Image: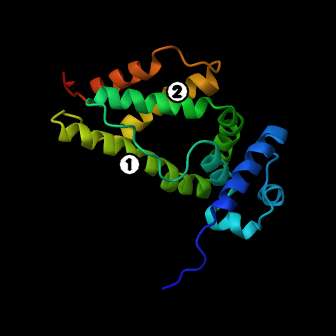
Amino acid sequence: MNRGRPRSGHVDEAVADAVRALLAEAGYQALSIDGVAARAGVGKAGIYRRWRSKAEMVFAVVVHGPHPVAPADSGSLRADLAALAERIIGLLSGPYARLVLPGLTADLSADPALAARFQAGVIDAERALVAEILDRARARGEEAGDDAAFVHALLLGPIYTYLFLAGGEVPPGLADRLAGTAVAALGTKESP
């Protein structure tokens, strides 16, 4: 069954370039789907086939798309979680993320339908990535628990707080401290 034309990588790149340019020029609040379509030289329908809202489009371009990838298996749960926390810090510390996330957070708070889609599309994918890390640890014989939602919140919450609510700087060693806290909170015994 033919489901239409395949997605064009050119459109994805043009939209991403337009989003970043418009964010740099005017910020998140002033950015619009119309403006992105005009800057990218694509139709709005092409954008709406990919994302249902400005918030979803911007998050996918600036932070990560719908399928984040787990860090390489390091051999221990703590090291895997530390690598993931470092990746989160890097993603949320980027200049575009700093322009976007405060406004995106406000949009999510004001729009329950958007928040539900964001939960289903972004948060659930991130939690699945954490679950993959926990599964790997269990496969190695570590007692890793299975509360991916808790581990996700435990990693993301402090990082978001430091970057967006408490001065904008992450203290040195935070990723490892968060990984150690998560391992301890799960009641797991670390592998040697």
Q: Position of residue 63 (x, y in %)?
A: 59, 42
Please name the residue shown 69% across and 51% down the image.
16
In the depicted structure, whether residue 87 falls above or below residue 104: above
Q: Is residue 26 left or right of residue 169?
A: right
> Hey, which quadrant is residue 24 in on the image?
top right
> Disc 2 marks which residue?
159
**Which mark is first along the chain, 2 or 1?**
1
Q: Residues within 10 Å of mark 2 (few under 14, many from 20)?
A: many
Q: For residue 128, which numbered disc appears in the image?
A: 1
Q: Tag 1's secondary structure?
A: helix
Nearer to us in this view, 114 or 30: 30
Q: Position of residue 27 (x, y in %)?
A: 79, 40
Q: Position of residue 79 (x, y in %)?
A: 33, 26
In the picture, which quadrant includes the C terminus?
Answer: top left
Q: Position of residue 115 (x, y in %)?
A: 58, 52
Work out which residue is located at the far bottom of the displayed protein and give it. 1
Q: Is residue 16 left or right of residue 156?
A: right
**Mark 2: which amino acid?**
Ile
